[in-house]
Image: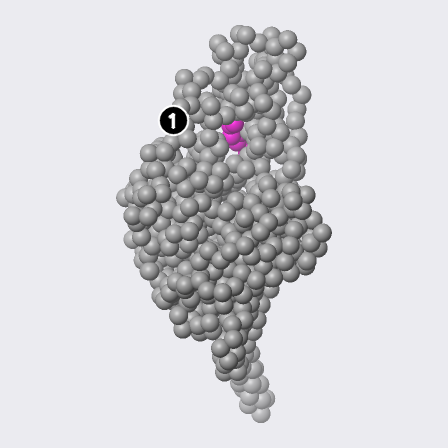
Amino acid sequence: EIRTFICLLMTALNLGMWCLFMYTNYKHASQISDERRHATEGYNWESAISNDEDRETVFDTCRLVPSETWTAELRAMLNTSYDPMSSCNRSYIPWTTLTREGKVQQSMGSIYADQCEARCLEFATDRTYARSDWINLKEDKVFKCDIVEARCVKDGSTVYNFLHTQIVKKSPVKTSRKRVKSAQSVYILVIDSLGASHARRVFPETIKFMQDNFGAVDLKYMNKIGENSRPNGFAFLTGKSVTDMKRELLGLPTVYRDWSMEESCGTHVDGRGFIMQEFEKLGYTTMMAEDWHDGVFNWPACVGFGHQPATHYMRPFQIRYGKDKPASLLQHQGADNCFEPHLFLNDYTEKFIQAYPSSTPKMAVTWAAYLSHDDANAAFHADRQYKEFFERNKDELDNSFVILMGDHGMRYGKTRYTTVGKKDMSNPFVGFSIPRNLRVSDTLSNLQRNSEKLLTWFDLYETFVDIKETFAVRNQQGRKDFSQTILRLGTKGSSLLRPLPSGERSCRSLPIPPSFCICEQDREIIQLTPELDGIGQAVAKAANEVLVEERVADICAELRPARIIEVQHIKGSRLYDAIVEMTPGGGHFQALVRDIGVNGNRSFVSVAPDIMRLNAYKSQAHCFKTSDNRHLCYCKDLL
């Protein structure tokens, strides 16, 4: 009887454990489904489909068509021979040099000065730097800091400043997580405003070199998720959304941001999923450099990092160069003498690569904000510079994960009004290469297959997480099967190194605002008639409502439609893609509007967060610097 009782008890326990296992797995799968639905739609999918007969359906599916690289229209607009450095002084020699030992030495140019000295600049906050005392160069001091500023004085006035960089080696961060010895490095090089087709125009040699030597894959259909660098940067570097996704135009509810403005701007980014710090926890040696002092985590007026976010952080250089910008510094280290901000980044990165052996796992993020941001012609000359950077560092990069990318496409200028330019704005370039030893595995074939699908920055972030967890963490054999899809709870993306989840990938099923959707729709240009005047009024009304919500209507002028420039009807819907000129300021705004009229009467509505400005506005919005919506502001003091 005892034996029978024990058998029955064991059977009951086994059955209970099996039931618990099945329930847990069911709940886990349900959570994945719920999380995915929340991240992409923010509402119950089935009830929305069955109950909302008024919704638009053009975004339910996605037809992907690659943009043309060159059109007759673009050839007439662009100058491939343009080089902003064509007349710079290539014979200039700095008055000081920084030796490999960390000593600052004087050259012949400094003989005209009474005294030359140098000091260290180091991280204090993302807005300030700590500085050491000036040391006379005659003391032959060794400077043990990455950023060394030199200056020379003549008759009591500073006549020379120069910022030198070096990599002073540091020990990796101690961590409790075990890392594999063969962990491979990751290099992320961002070029601001580099669209997919524009990259093929301005960087043909660089892209070809990456493809021929690193097996780089062009992720053709990356779709941005926000208007400017800030929301897109947060997405691929932290995996979080920082703007609401309003979808009323589609008859869908709003998908709310992960972090409010206070959480993303008024709170430090440290320790909240920033991908570089996640790699650093595994003992990676890291480096971060942006050439704009108001970087992706600092604009607009945000606190950024509370502690130095990387082993090597170039921020003091940018604050001194771009914020303080003493005249004698720009005179010697400026464009007149052939110095360019993106080359400062490449030089610092190259020193970082050379400072540590290839066996040291490294991660670097650089962000070139100036090169391609304001002028579609400005980057043509940089093709050779980037190609040569990759050539010089070929051995290291060939065995690393390398991503050369934009954050969005060109937002301003003549090309922005072309068919290719409109799409490029939402379709940033991403060239992705994996280490040589992985190019014969499922990893590469998955990446190639996924390059033909609609993607978002959240997918790229999950790819970085997958690299960390699979190739850097010890004892992760269960993750080495790349025929399997892995989904993390509470995330909005999927690793591009694995098969993507089954199902339609569209701007409805993915977290993509409808105004930014790169899926092809059948469109027709509408002849402008008085009955379409309501489109301009709808866009102006929505923009003004945002200014009221932001509590800046007292300093920002009320916008009024001056003229409608263009209207395209999206066939099969009541949606119109319009470009409207506003007054005051002459701003050109592009927005999706919806005709909600009945019985043949036209009535239009727009959603302001998706209103894009096509021409520059910086000086017009000088009174409003603390919001993603400052592009809607024309300061009243300019009237």
Q: What crowding class fits label 1: few (fewer than 14 Cα within 10 Å), some (14-19), or many (20 or more)?
A: few
Q: Residue 297 vs residue 425: left or right? A: right
Q: Residue furthest front?
A: 530
Which of 421/274 is in front? 421
User: Residue drawn 59% across and 28% down?
Assistant: 325
Where's residue 493, x and y in %? Answer: 48, 61
User: Residue drawn 50% across and 40% down?
Assistant: 369
Where's residue 332, x and y in %? Answer: 51, 20
User: Residue drawn 59% across and 56% down?
Assistant: 560
User: Residue drawn 38% across and 52% down?
Assistant: 418
Which of 352/345 is in front? 345
Colour style of the rendered protein structure: one colour
Q: Which residue is mark 1?
A: 86
Instruction: Determine the secondary structure under disc 1.
Output: loop
Q: Residue furthest left?
A: 212
Where's residue 260, x and y in %? Answer: 64, 57
Q: Amino acid at mark 1?
A: Ser
Q: Residue 122 vs residue 514: left or right? A: right
Q: Is residue 315 visible?
A: yes
Q: Which residues are magenta?
A: 165-171
Q: How many marks?
A: 1
Where's residue 170, x and y in %? Answer: 55, 34
